[in-house]
């Protein structure tokens, strides 16, 4: 599909349609255009998409059902005091919306995803299902080797189900395509930081999320068209405070919540929404040597510091403070999904680092299907006013 020359509004409409498409119509279309090829879903936060593309598969990031799905059966599989995304994912699976996927991969993020992976095997025994263990040891000779072995296992298992056998050249080519996408994502972030009114956080959210089920090269073309249209669109400068939003790396907030934060006077110039597409800082160096090891080591060496990735010798909060400084933000919003253990357990340590650096912050919790944002909007409004007036949290 060609996006060149499309208007900003048309591109945003396309992104919104893809984001709201719980039935995965675009994945059905891709499979019709690529007969015999597999579509493989994966849960947040991060899965190595180039590996799937090298196998001729379409990687599909699954973010639950959002706010448009009624949960009827999904709730009965989980206790009440956990986050929402596993319930809506089970609901989608039981409702048949994920039937187009030939398999699902469950990266090790937390106990919830681990348990979901086990349940998936029992609920859908005919489908491919795999838990992807991520390394906790950051020595490439140990953790890198382990992770490359895990990736090789998944490649062999998918090949046994009809994917192409893994060839180093195909993986190198897929890494090049992913690096191109990554470079354009950097441009998107730069534009947001320099002129947040030209590409609002809610708009950036949609155009990045549009790539959840696109091959990397198509998403790159799409984002290039978005950048061209955003740079030339008529827009109005607004006098908001600049904030970094953190904690939303897995379950996603409703889009209307992001819009409510903007209306409350916050320009979100940096975030960890759908972090997986931006998990690796900079390009993956896959030109020489074993590309599987290159993919593994990129995660070890240049993976973003986040609650979902074990931090070995680093100091909790240091990366967040550095990001706030780098994007010249005035403060931080913690926005975590309710009952999200990784985000909420990290929060006190991150707050201590921000306090030490004298960076104002405030926090709220959400669920992907929340419909009322007035309280959060008022809280964010009070925060932005206080930062503007006094440079501090209320
Ligand atoms: S929202 Fe948090 S607790 Fe829930 S599955 Fe994701 S990382 Fe785990």
Image (cartoon, helix red, strand yellow):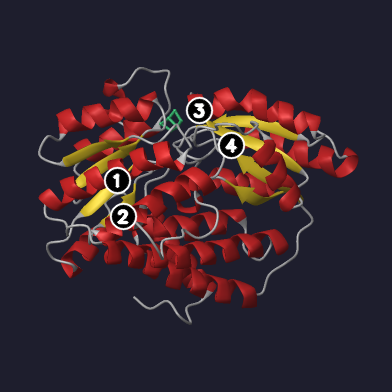
Q: Which mark is residue 373?
A: 4
Asked if disc 2 and disc 1 are in contact, CB closer than 8 Å, the reply is: yes
| Circle 1 crowding by C-alpha within 10 Å: few under 14, some 14–19, many from 20 | many
Q: Is residue 23 above or below residue 84?
A: below
Q: Position of residue 223 (x, y in %)?
A: 49, 68
Q: Quadrant of the N terminus?
A: bottom left
Q: CA distance from mark 3 to mark 2?
A: 26 Å
Q: Which mark is residue 199?
A: none
Nearest the eye: 45 or 266? 45
The reply to whether dot 3 and dot 1 touch (C-beta < 8 Å) is no
Say whether marks 4 and 2 touch (CB < 8 Å).
no
Q: Residues within 10 Å of mark 2 (few under 14, many from 20)?
A: many
Please identify the quarter of the rendering in which residue 64 is found.
top left
Task: Give me the C-alpha separation between circle 3 and circle 4.
Answer: 23 Å
Depth check, front residue: 364 or 60: 60
Q: CA distance from mark 2 to mark 1?
A: 8 Å
Residue corresponding to mark 3: 342
Whether residue 98 is visible, yes or no, is: no
**Marker disc for residue 51:** 2
User: Which structural element holds mark 3?
Assistant: helix
Above or below, 332 against 286 in this view is above
């Amino acid at each position: 599909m060609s996006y060149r020359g499309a208007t900003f509004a048309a591109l945003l409409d396309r992104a919104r349609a893809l984001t709201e498409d719980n039935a995965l119509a675009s994945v059905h279309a891709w499979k019709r255009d690529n007969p015999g090829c597999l579509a493989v879903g994966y849960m947040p936060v991060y899965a190595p998409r180039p590996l799937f593309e090298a196998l001729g598969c379409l990687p599909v990031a699954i973010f639950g059902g959002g706010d448009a799905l009624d949960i009827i059966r999904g709730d009965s599989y989980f206790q009440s005091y956990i986050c929402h995304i596993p319930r809506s994912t089970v609901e989608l699976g039981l409702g048949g919306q994920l039937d187009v996927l030939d398999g699902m991969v469950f990266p090790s993020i937390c106990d919830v995803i681990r348990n979901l992976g086990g349940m998936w095997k029992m609920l859908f025994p005919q489908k491919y299902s795999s838990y992807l263990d991520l390394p906790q040891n950051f020595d490439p000779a140990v953790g890198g080797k382990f992770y490359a072995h895990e990736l090789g296992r998944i490649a062999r298992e998918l090949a046994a189900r009809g994917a192409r056998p893994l060839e180093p050249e195909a993986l190198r080519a897929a890494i090049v395509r992913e690096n191109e996408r990554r470079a354009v994502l950097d441009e998107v972030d730069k534009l947001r930081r320099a002129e947040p009114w030209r590409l609002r956080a809610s708009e950036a959210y949609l155009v990045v999320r549009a790539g959840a089920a696109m091959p990397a090269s198509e998403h790159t073309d799409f984002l290039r068209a978005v950048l061209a249209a955003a740079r030339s669109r008529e827009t109005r400068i607004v006098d908001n405070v600049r904030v970094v939003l953190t904690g939303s790396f897995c379950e996603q907030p409703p889009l209307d919540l992001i819009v409510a934060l903007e209306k409350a006077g916050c320009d979100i110039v940096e975030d960890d929404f759908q972090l997986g597409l931006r998990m690796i800082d900079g390009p993956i160096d896959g030109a020489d040597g074993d590309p599987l090891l290159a993919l593994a080591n990129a995660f070890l060496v240049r993976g973003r510091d986040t609650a979902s990735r074990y931090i070995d010798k680093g100091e909790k909060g240091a990366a967040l403070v550095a990001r706030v400084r780098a994007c010249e933000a005035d403060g931080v919003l913690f926005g975590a999904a309710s009952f999200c253990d990784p985000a909420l357990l990290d929060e006190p340590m991150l707050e201590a680092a921000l306090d030490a650096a004298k960076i104002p912050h405030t926090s709220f919790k959400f669920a992907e299907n929340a419909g009322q944002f007035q309280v959060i909007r008022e809280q964010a409004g009070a925060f932005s006013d206080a930062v503007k007036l006094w440079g501090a949290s209320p």
